[in-house]
Image: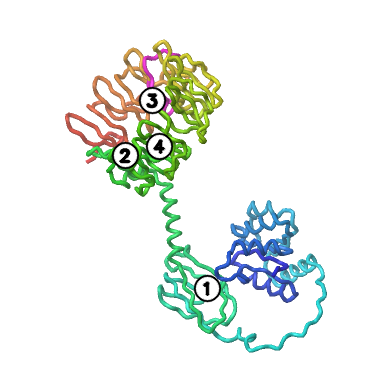
Amino acid sequence: MAHEVFISYSRKDTEIVNTVEQELTARGISCFIDRSGINLGDDFAEIIAKAIYECQIMLFVWSENSNQSENTANEIALAIDFGKTIVPFKIGQFQSHYKLAYRLVRFNRIDAVTFNHDNVVELAEKLERQLGPKPENKTVSPDPVSPAATAHSIPCFLKIRPNLACHVFVDGEPKTNAEADKITKLPLNRGTFFLEFVSVENDADKYSCEYRISDTEELLNVDLLSIKKEREDKEEKERLEKLELGSFRDKNEKWGFRDKNTDEIVIPPKYDFAWSFSEGLAGAELNNKWGYIDKTGKEVIPFQKYNFGSPFSEELASVKLNGKWGFIDKTGKEIIPLKYDNAFSFRKELASVKLNGKYGFIDKTDKAMIPFKYNEAFSFSDEGLAPVQLNDKWGFIDKTGKEIISLKYESTGNFQEGLVKVKLNDKWGFIDKTGKEIIPLKYDSVWDFQEELVNVKLNDKWGFIDKTGKEIIPLKYDFAYVFSKGLASVQLNGKWGFIDKTGRDVIPLKYDYVDGFSKGTTKVKLDNEEFYIDKQGNKIK
């Protein structure tokens, strides 16, 4: 049956809504409230949508509670889509949520600084005016009242058997507590009630339903365990998504995964090799076969088939079998046939692949987008450029295949921090994405920019320059690695230590060997003794 008024509200305002409903019902206005007219097993969302579609007016009880409710926001959006008139009944003084304020700005509302009977009467009269006069009905003599018609006043018992200890609410009011796997009797009259069961252990685990009581004793089994499991599964998924895992190799040459923040081993080392996680999965090798695992260590794509697998990028990973490459998705389904001689990861929706000795680029439907004509070609960078080689010369093309940077260089890399290294006449320098030379091609060797600086070699000595080519740290070292979290390892006169970005010796250059820092510590070697130090150079016992 269609109702004249659909009442949208927060269940925390049940007492207010009861008062409003009583006033409207007394005036002959039929109301739909989501705690009545819905039976156990009904499709809740479908019933709500149908009721909004069939009503004449939506009454929105706008309180501090409903102001933050996602359900009421969805109901209002649906009413607007259906072209319904909305009457906002705002109770109290509070900042309107921006989404509601925007959606309701065109509707006249009733403001009640404090909720009282006069406000309810004003609201009811406004709704009466908007609904208009009711058509007259012919008086029909009622059927004789049967004993069953008065049975709603006969006391009944609803027997509740939850599988978790819970608090029981009836029509928003607390009624009793129920023990797990035991029957609790709840005295109720015949009729329809809105029941809520809230876990004692965690109030996020709750089950609610409309229940119609028609017999003197009925049994309702309440499954809170499945709701608890759904919540725990969701929380675990969110935890894993936030978890930063890095691959590591142990002393037995086996690879596993540890938490990057705590250094705790999460997946024990057992793999012959392992990539870091990418898009939720990590590729690894086990017994000469490649597969993929999730952050729990579960095999998502079994270690049964492939000779090699690359990390996932843009939802696909390149894999190799019997000398041929193709692409799979995260279920292991082969999306692009294994027919290529080589394949790099998808970047910017395109992947570099090799066929019949030449490289070109395909899209995710396996359509050739850039012709197969290059001797070498790598993936696109964030700048939208890909390095390609033809006739022993390197340059860069865009996604249409247009040559953006001339193919004239002897070697190159990929863009890092806006610049890319290039080699010409046996000397290295840096250009930007337009091909403009930013740092002169004069160095014997260069790495990639890291933390705004790059290590360069000239006349057999290493130092650091910035993106303008200015020498920041003198070229005096025998060797230098890139900066990581403000420190770089350098070698001078056969001894290693660490410097900061000003060139200051933070950890003295006295060690025979140093590793990179991880979680604030690094392994060093001094006088044939290996041990760990912190970033101040203190030995860790």
Q: Position of residue 404 (x, y in %)?
A: 54, 20
Mark on residue 311?
A: 4
Q: Which residue was labeled with disc 2?
A: 289
Q: Nearer the viewer, residue 506 or 483?
A: 483
Residue 31: where, in percent of width, then height?
69, 70
- Residue 42 sits in quarter: bottom right
State the CA–CA distance, disc 3 to disc 4.
Answer: 36 Å
- Quick check: marks 4 and 2 in contact, CB under 8 Å? no
The nearer-to-camera label among 3 and 4 is 4
Q: What element carries label 3?
A: loop
For disc 2, the neighbor class at 10 Å (few under 14, some 14 to 19, many from 20) is some
Residue linked to disc 1: 169
Choose the circle earlier in sequence order: 1 or 2.
1
What amino acid is found at the position of numbered circle 1 in the picture?
A: Phe
> How many neighbours does mark 1 have within 10 angstroms: few (below 14), some (14-19), or many (20 or more)?
some
Residues at marks 4 and 2, CA–CA distance in whole angstroms: 15 Å
Return the disc, 4 or 2, that comes first in the chain's sequence. Answer: 2
Residue at (43, 61) in percent of width and height: 229
Image height check: is 330 above or below 192?
A: above
